[in-house]
């Protein structure tokens, strides 16, 4: 079969479309023909050697995907050949071969049925980003209707966070550097949209919030913007740290955490057990159903165009960037 193999760590330039042996399923696994897979920034981090996982090389990246089952191990129950399924965050594409391939072996515990009425494309890239957004929004316990600020709101995790937070009854503040994407973020539930590159954004936000401040940040960006966020936080404010697309935070004064009792907590979708991930996924689907929200697809690339798809991801998508693996 054809697959994008990462020959060595160092960067995405080490990915090559090549022939590899077809996967074989272990007793509690299925083999799936991949129809669509989805890209995530963590694929690049893993290729660059910046991710903790060190899978055997050559490695096939790709954590998300939707496909059709072509074989099942003898201990698999509830799934049969011909069933369509999507992959929920687990070891696929991280510690073991992923979905940038015509076929992939998946532990049956990492599968979920396609949500009713969703297209294959909507199913392909949803689970990782919605589970991440869910953890970021709920890891502090139940939050009364609050002000939730989402940085990098146009990306995969960002769109998922805006949709979920809005359906959960929060006032959503969404950051994007693009005016067009800010317009679209308003359409999917953001009450306030701001350009983080505008040096006056803190002043503008506090004016718009008319006395309120930010209770929770879903933080995808890091870099120098991080310390600016602390200035608009409410008493007992929380920051769920998801990503760091703008790199490490240069510095901030820890004194800024004291007086408003601010809390900072990491998010790791990979820390969900398969059982917890499946349970959280069901909660996500219930919340999405409130406004009949669906995943947003930014662009779909042909299987041989993976490098171009990564360029699109790096440029800043609006929703998910997908790879169409099988031509059906
Ligand atoms: N902790 C976890 O479990 C977990 C899970 C999934 C993802 N992540 C991480 O979370 C982050 C977001 O992931 P994603 O899938 O949402 O990414 P994405 O789809 O690539 O989108 C991120 C958005 O952030 C903005 N952005 C990108 N680079 C930026 C920069 N240098 N400065 C300011 N804004 C920038 C862009 O929006 P505009 O162009 O509209 O401004 C872009 O659309 C990544 O770091 C990813 O690795 C972590």
Image (cartoon, rainbow, N blue to C red):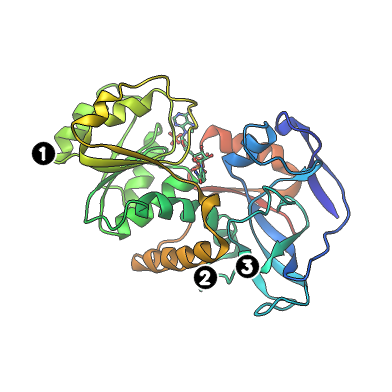
How much space separates mark 2 and mark 3, taking CA atoms?
Answer: 17 Å
Residue beneath the point at 33% across and 54% down: 165
Dot 2 falls on a residue whose secondary structure is: loop
Dot 1 falls on a residue whose secondary structure is: loop
Residue 113 seen anywhere in this rendered image of the structure = yes
Q: Is residue 54 left or right of residue 269?
A: right
The mark closer to the camera, 1 or 2, is: 1
How much space separates mark 1 and mark 3, taking CA atoms?
Answer: 47 Å
Residue at the spot of label 2: 115
The mark closer to the camera, 2 or 3, is: 3
Residue at the spot of label 3: 109
Query: At which x and y percent is residue 107?
Result: 69, 64
Q: Residue furthest left?
A: 211
Residue at the spot of label 1: 211
Residue beneath the point at 56% across and 65% down: 119
Q: Is residue 316 left or right of residue 82?
A: left
């Amino acid at each position: 079969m054809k697959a994008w193999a990462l020959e060595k760590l160092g960067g995405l330039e080490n990915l090559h479309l090549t022939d590899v042996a077809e996967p074989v399923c272990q007793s509690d696994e299925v083999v799936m023909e991949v129809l669509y897979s989805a890209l995530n920034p963590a694929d690049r981090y893993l290729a660059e050697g910046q991710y903790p996982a060190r899978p055997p090389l050559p490695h096939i990246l790709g954590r998300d995907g939707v496909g059709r089952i072509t074989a099942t191990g003898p201990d698999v129950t509830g799934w049969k050949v011909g069933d369509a399924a999507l992959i929920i965050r687990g070891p696929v594409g991280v510690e073991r071969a992923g979905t940038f391939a015509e076929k992939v072996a998946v532990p049956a515990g990492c599968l979920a049925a396609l949500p009713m009425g969703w297209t294959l494309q909507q199913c392909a890239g949803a689970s990782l980003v919605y589970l991440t957004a869910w953890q970021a929004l709920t890891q502090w316990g139940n939050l009364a209707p609050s002000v939730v600020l989402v940085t990098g709101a146009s990306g995969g995790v960002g769109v998922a966070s805006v949709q979920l937070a809005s359906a959960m009854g929060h006032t959503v503040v969404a950051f994007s550097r693009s005016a067009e994407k800010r317009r679209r973020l308003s359409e999917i539930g953001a009450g306030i949209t701001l350009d983080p590159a505008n040096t006056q954004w803190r002043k503008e936000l506090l004016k718009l919030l008319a006395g309120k401040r930010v209770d929770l940040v879903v933080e995808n960006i890091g870099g120098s913007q991080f310390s600016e966020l602390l200035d608009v936080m409410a008493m007992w404010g929380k920051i769920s740290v998801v990503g760091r697309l703008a790199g490490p935070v240069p510095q901030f004064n820890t004194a800024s955490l004291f007086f408003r009792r601010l809390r900072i907590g990491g998010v790791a979708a990979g820390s969900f057990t398969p059982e917890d991930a499946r349970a959280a996924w069901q909660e996500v689907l219930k919340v999405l159903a409130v406004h009949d929200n669906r995943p947003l697809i930014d662009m779909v690339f042909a299987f041989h165009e993976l490098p171009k798809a990564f360029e699109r991801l790096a440029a800043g998508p609006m929703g998910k960037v997908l790879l169409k693996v099988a031509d059906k």
